[in-house]
Image: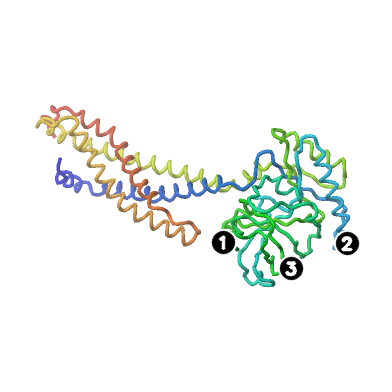
Amino acid sequence: MTLHPMIAALRKHKAGVILIALQIALTLAIVCNAVFIIGQRIERVNRPTGLKEQDLFLVTNQWVGAPTGDDPASIQKLDALLREDLATLRALPDVASVTPVNSVPLLNSSWNGSVALKPDTALLGGKARTTYYFGDQNFIGTLGVHLIAGRDFNAGDVTNKGFRNTSEPSVIIVSKALADTLFPKGDAIGKVIYLDGSGTPSTIVGEVARIQSPATGSWAGAFVWNAVIEPIRLNANFARYAVRAKPGRLQAAMREATPALYKADPMRVLDDDSVKSFADIRAHAYRADVGMAVLMGVICVILLGVTAAGIVGLTSFWVGQRHRQIGVRRALGARKVDILHYFQMENLLIAGLGAVAGIALAVGLNLLLMKYYEMDRMPVPYVLAGVVLVLLLGQGAVFTPARRASNVPPVVATRAA
């Protein structure tokens, strides 16, 4: 089967050929980038936080009539309220452990800053940006973070301070990502760093494998794994508690928490959103990513469907126009499979032209997305897979009208035009 007769036939249908080729090119460009976006969103949604997420929930509490001042008496009264709540939650039959926290991964409520290796330099850019977590000696165990070096906090390390107090702790635990940034040789334990421009040294006593930032926006992408854990009970007129339920008792522990806290002190506000599982926190944090992935998937399906329908329609039209020519070929000895292969090769030629144009469009669209939407560069395999997809789509779409053409009997050649 030679290409010359095929090309000559296609020249007589330039408009249809150009329309289908452009449709294939546009489909290839959009589908490649959409699938790349879907892949990024899926990877983002499924990335581990570093926590043992099962059986973990968060309680957010707002006290009514609590002190608002920064004087020592007010701070100690707030700390007493906080410690009473910790004792109340810890005493629940379905609770394994509890710790006060300022935030947890994916909560989108974060304390961020920068750290430095020299005093009074962190605010000038420092060595690295980081997220800060506050908790007590139960923080590591309650959240299920994996300690890989050094030691955990003990009760003697833990202090309390007011919400607006800028003092820094003497000991801290850091994530491996931050430790590797600050001390590439892997000798972070026992080293001193300075937090947020402070002149007070903080000694690294432990290192955890991973703990994700609470922030999920792209602005935090550069330091999403950098974290400093401080042994501090933060005192304010609100508080957050991370609670680990006993295995399989998450729902029971969540139901028990609110009544128990109200019984301990009714002067507080706990609404329907105050007690939430970490699974709900994760789902809420990534709802936009999931929505984007679903939208991109729907767009891909619609585009592929429209393109396939266009190929079927145009090929069917051509088959109708060429009935007599097909009959002549059959009368001259062409087999059914020859007619089938002819239309398949014709479609492959058109789809190939569209794929070449589509590669250029796909790369160009990716460059625009990189420039205006901070998207990553699309890997070459995505484009190659897209080319294979549109070629297979074309072959699948053309099969039915091509098979119908192969069934045209030789007798058609004897009919008047």
The first of marks 2 and 1 along the sequence is 2
Crowd around label 1: few <14 · some 14–19 · many ≥20 (10 Å): few
**Residue that carries the numbered disc 3 in the rendered image:** 200
Q: Position of residue 169 (x, y in %)?
A: 75, 61
Q: Are marks 3 and 1 in contact (CB under 8 Å)?
A: no
* Amino acid tagged 3: Thr
Quadrant of residue 271 within the rendered picture: top right
Q: Position of residue 400 (x, y in %)?
A: 29, 32
For the residues labelled 2 and 1, the Cα–Cα distance comes to: 42 Å
* Amino acid tagged 1: Lys
* Amino acid tagged 2: Pro
Q: Is residue 231 left or right of residue 184?
A: right
**Residue that carries the numbered disc 1 in the rendered image:** 185
In the image shown, does 333 or 175 lie closer to the viewer? 175
For the residues labelled 2 and 3, the Cα–Cα distance comes to: 21 Å
The first of marks 2 and 3 along the sequence is 2
**Looking at the rendered structure, which numbered label has been put on residue 72?**
2
Q: Relative to residue 108, is residue 279 depicted above or below? A: above
Crowd around label 3: few <14 · some 14–19 · many ≥20 (10 Å): some
Q: Relative to residue 396, is residue 39 depicted above or below? A: below
For the residues labelled 3 and 1, the Cα–Cα distance comes to: 24 Å
Q: Are marks 2 and 1 in contact (CB under 8 Å)?
A: no
Q: Is residue 251 left or right of residue 336?
A: right
Q: Secondary structure at mark 1?
A: loop
Quadrant the C terminus occupies: top left
Q: Position of residue 207 (x, y in %)?
A: 65, 54
